[in-house]
Image (tube, rainbow, N blue to C red):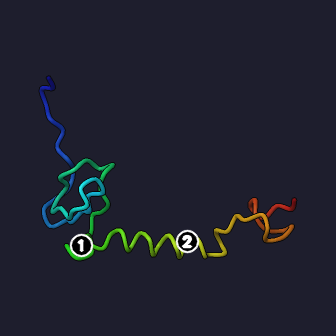
Amino acid sequence: MALFKRRAAGKPGEWYYCLQHGTVEEGPVCRAADRMGPYATRDEAAHAMETAAERNREWQSDPRWNDDASDGPDQGAGGRGA
């Protein structure tokens, strides 16, 4: 049995989205690996998955991050030729 229980870091007024439970939490309730945040408002935390999906779509279509080797001989693989 542990003598000291580690408390989750964070403060009231910070909002998190728990990936494991699919719920919004004020202050960290679940472990850090299972949550997204902190968010400034409850509403922002409630839309965490939509925000993440939107950012993923933006990242996938950003030409600065496109590593696809089919872009041509001078593209992909860090700009090195094939």
Question: In the rendered structure, which disc, 2 or 1, sits on the residue that comes first in sequence?
Answer: 1
Tag in front: 2 or 1: 2
Residue 37 position within the rendered picture, expressed as x and y whole percent measured from the top left: 30, 63
SS at circle 2: helix
**Residue found at the very far top of the displayed protein:** 1
Q: Position of residue 41 (x, y in %)?
A: 21, 74
**70 vs 73, nearest the viewer:** 70
Residue holding disc 2:
59
> Measured along the vertical axis of the image, is residue 7 above or below residue 78?
above
Instruction: Report, in whole angstroms, how far the alpha carbon at label 2 lies from the one at label 1.
Output: 23 Å
Amino acid at pointer 1: Ala
The quarter of the displayed image where residue 61 is located? bottom right
76 sits to left or right of 14: right
Q: Position of residue 21 (x, y in %)?
A: 24, 56
Q: Where, by quadrant of the figure, is residue 1 drawn?
A: top left
Q: Name the residue rendered at 37%, 73% in the picture.
A: 50
Q: Residue at x 22, y 76 (%)?
A: 43
6 versus 57 height, above or below: above
Residue hosting label 1: 40
Image quarter hosting the C terminus: bottom right
Q: Amino acid at mark 2?
A: Trp
Q: Residues within 10 Å of mark 2 (few under 14, many from 20)?
A: few
Element at label 1: loop
Give above or below for 42 relative to 69.
Answer: below
* Front in this rendered view, residue 50 or 14: 50
Q: Position of residue 79 (x, y in %)?
A: 78, 64
Q: Residues within 10 Å of mark 1 (few under 14, many from 20)?
A: few
Q: Quadrant of residue 51?
A: bottom left
